[in-house]
Amino acid sequence: WWGNWGARGTAEFADARWTHAIDWRQILSPFPDHTGTFLGFFPHSLITLPRPVVAARERQGFLLGKSDEYFQGKEGVVHALLGAGWRLYTVSGHFPPTDRLVRLPPQSPTDFAAMLTNMSFMLGFGDPLMSPTPLEGLARGAAFINPIRVA
């Protein structure tokens, strides 16, 4: 409900906005939309992990997106990367794991950030406003690629 707090019927708390007088500035949001007070994201690995060493990285990348819907219709991109010799990591169950496509188990934020330190890139498939991972990965030295197709 983070991004749609004030929309009718979008979450269990949404209807409360319409029955109580609440100043929009009282609603804290991690998203820079026109409602609420924007909190922003902070890459906590900057204070919890040692500074990443600038060095060549292995040919591996992280596929950003938890929901399978982000990957539907984009399987060709993943297969092209695998065919080019990249080792890919994901938290999604959309793709069956192989020796070159690793499904990661749930991790602590610190372990997740440490894992991103080993990535050459992160590839976005959805809406990066829904995740602090791009900022965390950039702080750990991984490039963030988020293609946008305008129809």
Image: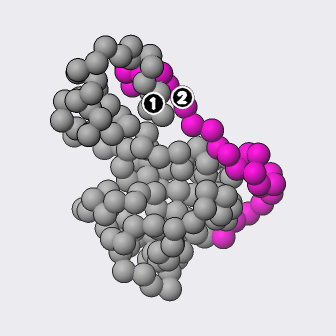
Find out whether the residues at labels 1 and 2 contact each other: C-beta distance under 8 Å. Answer: yes
Q: Residue 127 magenta-drawn?
A: no
Q: Residue at x 57, y 37 (%)?
A: 41
SS type, badge 2: loop
| Marking on residue 29 | 1
Amino acid type of disc 2?
A: Leu
Amino acid type of disc 1?
A: Ser
Residue 134 in the figure: left or right of residue 54: left
Q: Residue at x 22, y 38 (%)?
A: 10
Residue 92 seen by the camera? yes
| Marking on residue 39 | 2
| Vertical position of residue 38 compared to residue 113: above or below | above
- Residue 101, x across and y down, in percent: 47, 77
- Residue 118, x across and y down, in percent: 67, 65
* Few, some or many residues within 10 Å of mark 2 (<14, 14–19, 20+): few
Q: Magenta segment, which residues?
A: 33-58
Q: Quadrant of the C terminus?
A: top left
Q: CA distance from mark 1 to mark 2?
A: 6 Å
